[in-house]
């Protein structure tokens, strides 16, 4: 066992260390490049997890590194009492590339912070306390975001949560409408649930929710922290149904896999509170020049290299290969689903999924289960993958399924 692993176990998170040991990943990571990661023993892994939808450009994309290096030599951190050009330029860029009239931006350092800001903006703008969230939804683990993440394992040990949150079934527009009251400020949802296990709502759901919220004067917050930046085959998953949310959250891939950054982009009138009270919400590191330089480069690369389209093509190729394997192993794989390169492999049993994850790791392919749904193994590789990488992953998965079958036959 490596030294860093022991220190991690002792000083960071013993439970997580146990989980990593179980999946055969009790090793130190060492370096990464493109679609590959190496551990300290020199073993190479194909990164089919991509930090849960963060590594859309692969690891260490040269244009993002170059942008960060240039900013590093100039001014990595803002003094905060002057306007930062990279931040202002990134805000303008986000206004340009997000749907419809979204044009004002608040910056944080993570997805959870983007959600926190959206939560506050919704209450500030409407003067109402309630927010509606969906079953299986994941919006982060800070208190506001956690209150919108209806998972007893995360919520119950740290109650009381932020009050005023109601949960309705994901994918059911009628139930959502029925839950709206005169105290409802906003609805928050993911266009495709990531941590919930790659759950695609029925077609027309987003459009229906948009119509209902508009009619009832309720804000719609679309959480694109995981689905955004090209992951599902469009720059934003909201575009699949042509909807314009009132607030859109983004993080993860926004930093190009090099810097942490989160943002909420919204209709300008929702930011009116800042006019009267500019410090009603703020963050020391949010929108720092280094992260903004990375994000500007990441957006440029995503658009210039046509990565949403590539996600669609490679996603289709991967999905059809997975479906073939699912047909061969129906006792293991219940369903394969996804859009673009946001793909879930639902196992008949969470323990079987865990065995397959560890077999895959042994064969040099990194994946993980959904935080909210351990039956689903998630595949969110960099959008720059090529057919040969997909073939490599499919071969490893086939061998892993065979090995799992052999293991289970030995047990039974
Ligand atoms: N929203 C969604 C949809 C997410 O998938 C996540 C992270 N998995 C978050 C919010 C929270 O992001 P972070 O971990 O950066 O706080």
Image (tube, rainbow, N blue to C red):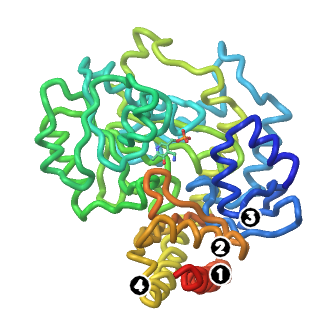
Q: Are marks 3 and 4 in contact (CB under 8 Å)?
A: no
CA gap between label 1 and label 2 equals 6 Å
Q: Mark 3: give few (<14), some (14-19) or many (20+) Cα within 10 Å.
A: some
Lower position in the chain sequence, tag 3 or tag 4: 3
Mark 1 residue element: helix
Lower position in the chain sequence, tag 1 or tag 2: 2
> Which residue is labeled 1 in the image?
396
Q: Are marks 1 and 2 in contact (CB under 8 Å)?
A: yes
Q: Position of residue 46 (x, y in %)?
A: 70, 70
Mark 4 residue element: loop
Name which quarter of the figure residue 164 lies in: top left
| Viewer-nearest of discs 1 and 4 | 4
CA gap between label 1 and label 3 equals 19 Å
Mark 2 residue element: helix
CA gap between label 4 and label 2 equals 18 Å
CA gap between label 1 and label 4 equals 18 Å
- Residue 360's label in the rendered image is 2
Q: Mark 4: give few (<14), some (14-19) or many (20+) Cα within 10 Å.
A: few
Q: Nearer the viewer, residue 275 or 390?
A: 390
CA gap between label 2 and label 3 equals 19 Å
> Which residue is labeled 3 in the image?
34
Mark 3 residue element: loop
Q: Position of residue 140 (x, y in %)?
A: 48, 38
Name which quarter of the figure residue 31 lies in: bottom right
Q: Nearer the viewer, residue 294 or 316?
A: 316
Q: Decide if ligand 1 comes within 8 Å of the CB at mark 4.
A: no
Lower position in the chain sequence, tag 2 or tag 3: 3
CA gap between label 3 and label 4 equals 33 Å
- Residue 330's label in the rendered image is 4
Looking at the picture, does residue 308 appear above or below residue 216? below
């Amino acid at each position: 066992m490596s030294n860093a692993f022991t220190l991690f176990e002792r000083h960071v998170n013993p439970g997580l260390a146990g989980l990593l040991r179980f999946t055969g990943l009790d090793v130190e990571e060492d370096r990464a490049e493109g679609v590959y990661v190496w551990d300290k023993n020199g073993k190479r892994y194909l990164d089919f997890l991509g930090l849960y939808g963060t590594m859309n450009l692969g690891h260490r994309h040269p244009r993002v590194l170059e942008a960060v290096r240039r900013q590093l030599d100039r001014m990595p951190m803002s003094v905060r009492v002057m306007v930062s050009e990279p931040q202002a330029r990134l805000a303008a860029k986000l206004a340009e590339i997000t749907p419809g009239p979204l044009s004002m931006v608040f910056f944080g350092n993570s997805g959870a912070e983007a959600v926190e800001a959206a939560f506050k903006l919704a209450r500030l703008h409407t003067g109402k306390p309630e927010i509606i969230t969906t079953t299986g939804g994941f919006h982060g683990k800070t208190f506001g975001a956690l209150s919108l993440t209806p998972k007893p394992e995360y919520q119950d040990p740290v109650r009381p949560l932020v009050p005023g949150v109601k949960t309705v079934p994901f994918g059911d527009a009628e139930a959502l409408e029925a839950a709206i009251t005169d105290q409802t400020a906003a609805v928050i949802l993911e266009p495709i649930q990531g941590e919930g296990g790659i759950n695609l709502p029925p077609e027309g759901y987003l459009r229906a929710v948009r119509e209902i919220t508009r009619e009832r004067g309720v804000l719609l917050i679309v959480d694109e922290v995981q689905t955004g930046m090209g992951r599902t085959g469009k720059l934003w998953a909201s575009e699949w149904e042509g909807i314009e949310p009132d607030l859109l959250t983004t993080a993860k891939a926004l930093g190009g896999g090099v810097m942490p950054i989160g943002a909420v982009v919204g209709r300008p009138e929702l930011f009116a509170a800042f006019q009267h009270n500019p410090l009603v919400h703020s963050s020391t590191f949010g929108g720092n020049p280094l992260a903004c330089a990375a994000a500007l480069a990441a957006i440029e690369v995503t658009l210039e290299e046509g990565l949403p389209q590539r996600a669609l093509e490679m996603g289709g190729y991967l999905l059809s290969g997975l479906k073939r394997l699912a047909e061969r192993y129906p006792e293991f794989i219940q369903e394969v689903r996804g859009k673009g390169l946001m793909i879930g492999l639902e196992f008949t049993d969470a323990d079987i999924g865990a065995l397959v994850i560890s077999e895959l790791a042994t064969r040099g392919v990194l994946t993980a289960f959904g935080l909210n749904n351990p039956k689903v193994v998630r595949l969110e590789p960099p959008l720059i993958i090529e057919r040969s990488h997909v073939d490599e992953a499919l071969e490893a998965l086939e061998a892993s399924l065979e090995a799992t079958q052999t293991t289970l036959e030995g047990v039974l």
